[in-house]
Image (cartoon, rainbow, N blue to C red):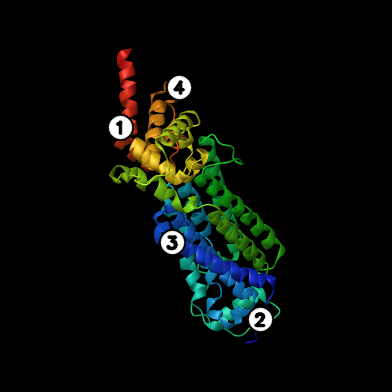
Amino acid sequence: MQTLPLRLDLFTILIFLGVAQGLFLGVFFLTGQRRASLANRCLGCYLLSVSAIMLEIGLEYSNYMFQTLALVDYGELFNFVLGPLFYFFVFAKLNRRLPRHWGWHLLPGAIWAINAMTWIFQPIEFKYNSYLHAFHPELPYVTAQEYLPEDFTNLRGYINQMTLISCLVYTVLSVLEVWDAFRKADLPLLGKAPAALAMARNVAAFTMVFPLLIGVIKASYQEDMGDHFLAAYLTVTIYATTLLVMRGSNVLQEEVEETAPDEQSSEEPRKKYEKSSLSDEQEEALLARLNQVMDTEKPYLESDLSLPKLAQRLNTSPHHLSQILNDRLGQNFFDLLATHRIAEAQIMLNNPAIKHLKIDEIAERVGYNSPSAFHTAFKRITNLTPAQFRADRMGRKLYRQ
């Protein structure tokens, strides 16, 4: 079997750097505290699948596949899971759950994986010919004996078209999900948004170009010879995702900030600040400023509000703000958020003008990205679920009439 020397150029370096970063980021999202987030788990699986496909493209483009012929075409196992996994990430980021009947989305990938066994478990000579057919048609083929009849579904000849359709469908579904989330939040699609919305929108924006690129490249190049352009773009997407993660830790901290503290805040110890640089007068002034900001600006409606952000708005330090909350109000920061958000939700649930709004929509409007966190906090503060509270108030109004 004839081989070719290794090719080392900009595309080779770019692809393998993308593979390394994708593997790192995928494992990062699937380990430690990050894996508590459903969206992080979906994103981690998506990045690992992308990295697996990119690795095959890198091996083929660099001619290193001549040394690793057993890996020829293994990347096709992941063709029909890329779209669903990305859609799951966007959906989970916005809704903290998977779409209904999510398992059906993975069925085409499972069927294709079974079909792929008929060309993955083949002799090396068969794989050598497959590699030449895709990347080096100028080289002579060798005689090969099949272990299994190849492609029992007779669909492999349409793999590029089917992959394009799959990616396009799930990209459209993801974009529509983002669009609907911004519409419900009454926010401009291209404007400033809470962390969860911004992350879903920005990653979707990078990914929506991919199916268009597939169409252009597959129409311009024979077989797989243009795939290095796709791999290069996926590398850019992976590094863009890395930058989005590095720009702010909200993508990693949302679950912790929004659920655990709200559910456990009543059990946290109230620590006194015995050694403080604040005088009583300064504490009173800071408390007054806090109350004014909370009443007039309502920053608690921002889903990504944090203790440092609120302290910055009050021109004080997070330590001093925490001290005021503990000593003067007997609360921690998450108790403060929950108190104001639930009070605002009660006003909205009492308002007949917006009775058409779903409870989850009200949860979003008062700053909760997680409906479960909203329901838990509401029940803890009012001893009623939001639905019970709304029904009780509406019933009293009807009784008075």
Residue 312 in the image: state x and y as whole percent: 51, 42
- Residue that lies at the very extreme toward the bottom in this rendered image: 1
Residue flagged by tag 4: what amino acid is it? Ala
Q: Percent position (x, y) of residue 362?
A: 43, 33
Q: Position of residue 229 (x, y in %)?
A: 67, 64
Q: Which residue is mark 4?
A: 353
When the figure is inspected, residue 167 is found, relative to residue 314, above or below; the finding is below
Is label 2 in contact with label 4 (beta carbons under 8 Å)?
no
- Residue type marked 3: Leu
Q: Amino acid at mark 2?
A: Leu
Residue, disc 2: 6
Q: Nearer the viewer, residue 333 or 201?
A: 333
Please indicate whether residue 231 sits to the left or right of residue 369 in the image. Answer: right
Which residue corresponds to the image point at 65% horizontal and 54% vertical from the top-left? 212
Q: Nearer the viewer, residue 93 or 230?
A: 93
Which residue matches tag 3?
30
- Mark positioned earlier in the residue sequence (4 or 3): 3
Secondary structure category for the residue under label 4: helix
